Image (cartoon, rainbow, N blue to C red):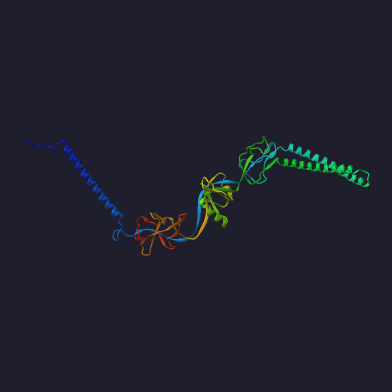
Amino acid sequence: MQISVPSRDRARAFARSQAKAIAALAVLAAGGLAYWHWGMAAKPAGKGERGPAPVIVAEAGRADMAVTLETIGAVEAYTSVAIKSRVDGQVVAVHFREGQAVKRGAPLFTIDRRPFEAALAQAEANLARDRAQFEKARLDFARYQDLAGKGVVSKQQLETARAAADGAAATVKADEAAAERARLDLSYTAITAPVDGRTGAVLVQQGNVVKANDANPLVVLNQVQPIYVAFAVPERNLPQVKAGMAKGAMTVAIAAPGDAAGALKGKLDFVDNSVDAATGMIRLKASLPNEGERLTPGQSVNVTLTLSTLAEAVTVPSAAVLTGPKGAYVYVVKEDMTVEHRPIAAGVARDGVTVVEKGVAPGEKVVTEGQLRLFPGAKVKLPS
């Protein structure tokens, strides 16, 4: 009797079919378990399954809320003066230290005075000589007038005397101008601070010869009290800036990184007359007293510009505001200790407080902690 034995290929095919069947059963089992787990997790807790969810609430209130714009700015000197010599000469004295604070009129440099003193002495001598000549010409003209009245001198001689007197008078005026110019040049040898400020590095030392109005300054003097902070804002905020400027001074808070003393207060002084077409930004400047010279030109600072103030706005803690597919919402606790899912129109947010333009009334309680266990109609309990 013959016994038929399955071929090797048929055995392999049978094994593969068995493995596929087992894998399909495993996928179905895993899917069923996931569906059961998801359904149990998504199902709201029933009355007998869980107790009320513990939450922390806060009341919506009313407060004046500042509408602000935050950006980065750069500190600029209120006035920056490149000190230059107005005469040629040798520097014989430097009267300050680098980085020193100086007052207006304080001496900075002294140029050698001797050449200018000599020039002034010569101009004054010329003036004295020509005044004497003018006095002689004036007296001669007076005598010629008397003689002309008696018919002793001709009219031509009288006119010649008049011209000599007028020429001498003009020469005296020219000499007076030359003497005044010499005095000015002499005064320019004492270079003083034109404003209160702080000096930079000394660029010309004692002994150097300088030229009048040279390209290189002797020192740069920066006025830092008061001081400017320059910054830029987007052009979309320009109408708000103009409206605020029309109502009066707009306040600016300046905070330097690392300065624990707090923000400095200033006012908006300048709005540029054009928007930068490349960036869509417009340049602004604020001025502030800069007590204690806490700010230094070139420093980067944080700028907060107050655009307007919302009076008696409805506010809630920012922790109460959540964001869903349809926008912002809060959970409002009702009198029966259940929560309501309340869509809101959220406005300005600042210092942990958010303005609610629509959706919540003052005095209503909103959930600030514990929202993860909540759903519309869920029971809640407050801390005892």
Q: Quadrant of the C terminus?
A: bottom left
Whole-percent x and y of residue 66? 50, 56
Whole-percent x and y of residue 306? 52, 54
Taking 302 as reference, is 206 above or below it? above
**Residue in the picture at 27% in, 52% down:** 35
Judged left or right of residue 133, residue 367 is left
Taking 294 as reference, is 370 above or below it? below
Taking 5 as reference, is 279 above or below it? below
Q: Quadrant of the N terminus?
A: top left
**Residue in the picture at 16% in, 38% down:** 10
Pick whichever, 319 or 164, lies toward us. 164
Pick whichever, 353 or 279, lies toward us. 279
Taking 59 as reference, is 99 above or below it? above
Q: Outermost residue toward the bottom?
A: 335
Whole-percent x and y of residue 356? 45, 59
Q: In which quarter of the view is residue 86 placed?
A: top right
Judged left or right of residue 4, residue 58 is right
Instruction: Count the numbered circles shown.
Output: 0
Whole-percent x and y of residue 369? 39, 56
